[in-house]
Image (cartoon, helix red, strand yellow):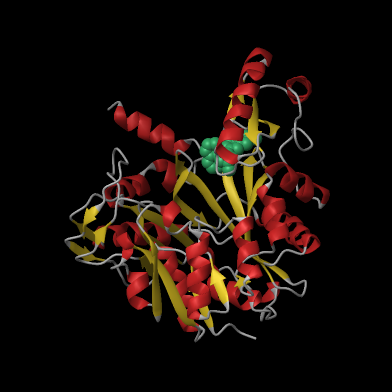
Amino acid sequence: MLFRKILIANRGEIALRVLRACKDLGIKTVTVYSTADAYSKHVLLSDESVCIGPPASKNSYLNMQSIVSAAVITGVDAIHPGIGFLSENVDFVNIVKEHGLQFIGPSAHDMELMGDKARAKETVKTFGIPVVPGSDGEVKSVEEGVKIASEIGFPVLIKSVGGGGGKGIQVAHNEQEFRELFSIAKTEAGNAFGNDALYVEKFLKNPRHIEVQVLADGYGNVVHLGERDCSIQRRRQKVFEETRCPILTDAQREELYSVVTNAIKKIGYLGVGTLEFLYEDGKFYFIEMNTRLQIEHTISEEITGIDLVKEQILVASGEKLSFTQDQIKFDGHVIECRINAENPETFIPSPGLIQNYHQPGGIGVRVDANVYSGYRIPPYYDSLIAKLIVKGKDRKECLMRTSRALSEFLIEGIDTLIPFHQKLIERPEIQNADYNINTLDKIIASEKNN
Ligand code: MV4
């Protein structure tokens, strides 16, 4: 039975994105908000809204008791966690279920499995997905780590099993460094994640970050929505993404899609998910799986014409996927620019009053934003305020149109990354698709010296 009413346990542009999918499905919406978000668009556009606490996330958007209480009081059938906050929190999934509500996402079991980065790697490896050479699972002692490191060759990365998204990573260039960093990493991981387990991997120096979007229903049907190249990032924060990856051959793609969908089927995964790979010298290496929607899901939507959030809600409510892989077509090229409320040179957050807001439009242009003229961006949360998503018949048209859309985009009163994107898109590295995960940091460093 399709859900009648959903609580959206998030804020900002992603809360609005989920709200729109609910409305398109005829599902009633309940939003939650902190006292800092009373005038946010997700609150203004929902059917009902419940204040769940003061500004600090830990007292509001991370407050499971308040959120579940709001869900029970308003009589919803399900909770959509959005992105970040509680979206990958296994305890939250269990609490939601204990209250007789559905969690829109994978099972607690699959979330826990993929949340353990070493187990995730071992699992997908047994299903034929290539992984970065390294330890099989956790490395229990520094001696075991030294042995593996000398087998695979330095430099190696010491990663935290409970980490992810780049937190708690150390690079060791030789045995002495490894011995020093291993104990530092163990302490840091214990403090940061409450889990001090570590694993070891060969360090890839200049890879691209390529990820595959999957969607699965509860009846064994799995489809992919192609890959996204998310290599353009600053300090592990993505700022520019494109689909499909401009440098892959169709043969490489088909091989990647085939191993990924096969593994997802074997796992019995439900809902939307993303498998992250590093790509270097023509080879793919799995690093992590995200068991939630991602910010950049929009580019996969635009290239396939599929509403991923709508499909996510449908499969969570027990529906079968209404299309097969053969029916999914990849049309043209799509780029996303993340518009953060940040200084375009220093990337320092710039909260405050938006005095004037005009967003671009026209063919091939989509803007997912949660702001408006007269809106005051609160200082407590992440700085993403808008996503510019641009489609063209090919990459060349897409790049031209992205420049055009950026030039139309007017946000006054605060600093934004619009000028940063205008410069970035003209760079030869972007124009020629000649980039990797280190390119943007290099560009920024070279600009500083000029
Ligand atoms: C790596 C790597 C190089 N070699 N693993 C950082 C975030 C986390 N998801 C995994 N990360 C990396 N793992 C091996 N074996 C380089 C990174 C990395 C990175 C990966 C994707 C996107 C941006 C990145 C920026 C710095 C480091």
Up the image or down, 116 lies above or below 25; here it is: above
Tally of numbered tags: 0
**Residue 127 can be seen in this image:** yes
What percent of the width, then of the height, locates residue 407? 25, 58
Of residues 258 and 57, the one nearer the viewer is 57
Q: Specify the quadrant that holds the C terminus.
A: top left
Residue 28 shown left or right of residue 375 in the figure: right
What percent of the width, then of the height, locates residue 214? 65, 63
Up the image or down, 20 lies above or below 145; here it is: below
Residue 339 shown left or right of residue 7 in the figure: left
Of residues 396 and 388, the one nearer the viewer is 388
The residue at the point 72 percent across, 63 percent down is: 269
Q: In the picture, residue 87 is in which quadrant? A: bottom right
**Residue 207 can be seen in this image:** no
The residue at the point 52 percent across, 62 percent down is: 65
Ligand 1 found in image quarter: top right
Q: In the picture, residue 256 is in which quadrant? A: bottom right
Of residues 386 and 170, the one nearer the viewer is 170
What percent of the width, then of the height, locates residue 138? 75, 35
The residue sitting at the right extreme is 126
What percent of the width, then of the height, locates residue 345? 28, 39
The residue at the point 76 percent across, 50 percent down is: 124
Q: In the picture, residue 343 is in which quadrant? A: top left
Up the image or down, 275 lies above or below 151; here it is: below
The residue at the point 16 percent across, 61 percent down is: 355
Q: Specify the quadrant that holds the N terminus.
A: bottom right
